[in-house]
Image (cartoon, rainbow, N blue to C red):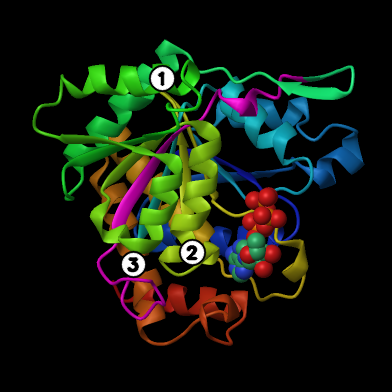
Amino acid sequence: MYKISLITGDGIGPELSESALQILNAVHDRLDVKFQIESIMAGDAALAKYGNALPKSTIDVIRKSDACMKAPVGESAADVIVALRRMLNLYANIRPAKSYPYMHALKDDIDLVIVRENTEDLYTGQEFELSGAAVAFRIISENASKKIAKYAFETAIQRNGKKTVTCVHKSNVMRKTDGLFSRVCSQIAKDYPQIKFEQMYVDACAMNLIRKPESFDVIVTTNLFGDILSDEAAEVVGGLGMAPAANIGDDFALFEPVHGAAFDIAGKGIANPSSFILSAKMMLDWLGKKHNDKKCMYAADKLESAVYGVVKKGVKTQDIGGNKSTMEFTKEILSLLTYI
Ligand code: ATP
């Protein structure tokens, strides 16, 4: 029995959470992976109710769970997700971008993953004002760079990809910080002779993600660059509505869509739940590997096949060219989960 904490979020978060809850209940009932799911609050709604975007009671439930599913939160995102990533030392942010048939991807053969350092860089929020200027600390440590570089090479080994790691930075301008990141990644590369290692400036990477996205396998980069490049990569393969992510630490992991709370479509019942359902797929994969639980890994594969089976049938939400509602789309996935 896995204990799952579920942050229901803001904006389209509650709609995505309802969809994911129905899917996980079906996985529990039909694929024999047992969950106990506890819904908790964090974000703008928690701030309004408790005066704190990340209440202690929420942190307590997360700490007692085996994994956390987090729907997007609104304006208080930095106080929730950035805080949780650092508090739980979730140092690796994994953002796959894969082109699937029947989706509007730029190319058909894209299958890359962005491995983003998740705990430092400009996202530590250490900013201050200084006589007419605003200053931010950019911290890039040897320790965190080593950990993320190793994670990227191990990912390249496990994936059925091009066995290539591309280290993305801007060391020609930020010589100290990105210089360190690039140097550490090159050192770690020496321990993985079976993996091809290349380096690319972030502006060139942004261009190449449009120009030849199929050439990438694993991209390893710092926090801010990874955030921006992963939104771009998501659009290249068909849109943010299909983009899942995992925040991974040594013992705990949190799964969430790449996108934010999308207030422009909140409450309309039209959000694409795939980003959160595919995040649940990543959770099943992670739990399966951690606990050597074959049922979990099987369920992960079946969930992914069901999402793409639905898209293949032409059943789509508005953002990917269809007219189905969040719940209609969810029901279609549930119907495919029945027959496997
Ligand atoms: P953040 O800065 O918190 O990441 P953002 O303001 O950049 O958020 P997002 O919420 O990430 O914006 O999304 C950008 C747009 O993409 C949304 O306004 C919405 O129209 C669309 N979008 C995002 N997620 C989905 C989804 N799951 N289904 C449909 N459309 C989506």
Nearer-the-camera pick, 94 or 172: 172
Identify the image quadrant of residue 183. Answer: top left
- N-term-proximal mark, 1 vs 2: 1
Q: Tag 1, which secondary structure? A: helix
Tell me which amino acid carries mark 2.
Answer: Glu
Tell me which amino acid carries mark 1.
Answer: Gly
Q: Is residue 82 above or below residue 301?
A: above
Mark carried by residue 235:
2
Q: Residue at x 76, y 49 (%)?
A: 74
Label the magenta part by its dominant secondary structure. Answer: loop
- N-term-proximal mark, 1 vs 3: 3
Q: Position of residue 221 (x, y in %)?
A: 42, 34
Q: Residue at x 26, y 48 (%)?
A: 217
Circles 1 and 2: CB atoms closer than 8 Å? no
Q: Confirm if mark 1 falls within 8 A of ligand 1.
A: no
Q: Which residues are magenta?
A: 100-127
Query: Which quarter of the rendered picture does the C terminus lie within?
Result: bottom left
For label 2, count other residues whose C-alpha is less than 10 Å away and answer few (under 14), some (14-19) or many (20+): some
Q: Position of residue 186 (x, y in %)?
A: 25, 22
- Ligand 1, seen in the image, is in the quarter at bottom right
Tell me which amino acid carries mark 3.
Answer: Ser
Task: Please name the residue that numbered disc 3 is placed on.
Answer: 99
Question: From the viewer's perspective, is the residue at label 1 or at label 2 nearer?
Answer: 1
Q: Position of residue 263 (x, y in %)?
A: 76, 62
Q: Is residue 221 left or right of residue 4?
A: left
Mark carried by residue 142:
none
Task: Please name the residue that numbered disc 1 is placed on.
Answer: 179
Number of marks drawn: 3
Identify the image quadrant of residue 2. Answer: top left
Q: Tag 3, which secondary structure? A: loop
Q: Is residue 101 above or below residue 286?
A: below
